[in-house]
Amino acid sequence: MFNKKLLAERLGPLTKSKKLNDLKPVEKYIVSKCKKEGLAYSYDVIAEEMPYFKTMGYTEYGTNFMFQPLNLKLRVEQILEASNDDTSEVLDWVSYLKNNIKNKVANKYQNRQDNFIEFKEKDNLVILPGSNKIKTNCCINRLKSIAKEHKGNIYFKPHPITTHAVIGEIKDLFGEEAILPRDIDMYYFLEKAKKIYSTHISESVLYAIVLGKDVEPIDVYQNVHQGSFYSINNPLYDNQKNGIEWINKTFSSYKSGVINPNVDKDWKNKVDLYIEYIVAKREKYKGWFIDTPNKVKK
């Protein structure tokens, strides 16, 4: 999460927010726990291993540490079970997230532009993923339909990791006047808009729900489950009316794998409980499936 060489390869000239430094001790502690349990660990990677998984994945989500196995079934189950957990004290995660926006620390990247004078307010905001995900994860026909419906009253916000070539394509499709700069502060427009269109791979869904916005997806449906945030964003899309309560209860549970020293009263204990919980779930599937092909005799 804080490997400079790895980040340079992935982010280029972008620099991650200093706010994420709060998660350094969490990463260090979790890596040590994985090693103790004999589990591999990987930052910002999603894959489909067996239910008796080999690897724990982790990433940042809304300035929180998000910890989950590289198996879709168990990722979904842990969030469902967290949302139904009545044993954990419910903490105020939503106020923490609102304060991130208020204090201008919600952005994942530093040095966001804040010159908004030339941009009038519009009611609809489409939040796009990076260049490598637009064509695989976004439904272009859906985007065209949204643009037509809200013509003149909509902005498209390119991800900071978007090439100039792709931005040019977006402008050709939806008109230059509807495209925001890729490096401008997205959260300013998120607060101003009434309706948000986003993907299952964006943490903007979480912040939109926290701000009480109406949110709809723009994904290619067949690919929604492939993103790191799917296990949380999918129920958020489905439970918007109860989103505030859902976030507080789910994130407060150790079963969620969501950790933040700024909210959790004893984050190390929460990590310990989570590791115990997810390893026990993993153990149930030992021997159920073989992840190497049988050799065929010639």
Image: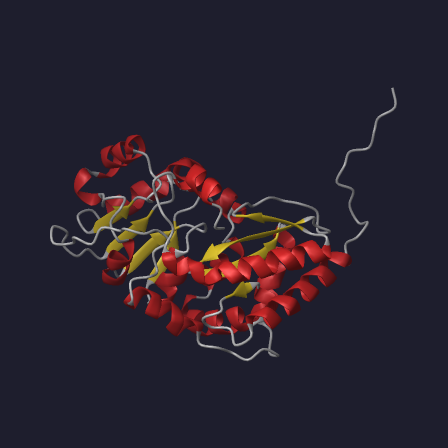
Which one is nearer the viewer's eye here, 221 or 80?
Answer: 80
Q: Quarter holding the C terminus? A: top right
- Residue extending furthest right? 297
Colour setup of the view = secondary structure
The quarter of the picture where residue 215 lies is bottom left
Q: In this rendering, is residue 174 above or below 111?
A: above
Query: Percent from the top left, x then y, of residue 166?
Result: 31, 33
Query: What residue is at 35 percent from the left and 41 percent from the top?
Result: 161
The quarter of the picture where residue 176 lies is top left
Q: In this rendering, is residue 294 above or below 253?
A: above
- Residue extending furthest left? 118
Q: In this rendering, is residue 220 above or below 68?
A: above
- Residue extending furthest top? 298
Query: Percent from the top left, x then y, of residue 93?
Result: 44, 72
The quarter of the picture where residue 73 lies is bottom right
Query: Percent from the top left, x then y, of residue 269?
Result: 61, 72
Left or right: 101 in relation to 50: left
Which one is nearer the viewer's eye here, 259 or 155?
Answer: 259
Query: What residue is at 47 percent from the left and 73 percent from the top?
Result: 263
Which one is nearer the viewer's eye here, 85 or 138?
Answer: 85
Q: How many marks?
A: 0
Left or right: 118 in relation to 91: left
Query: Percent from the top left, x then y, of residue 24?
Result: 49, 59
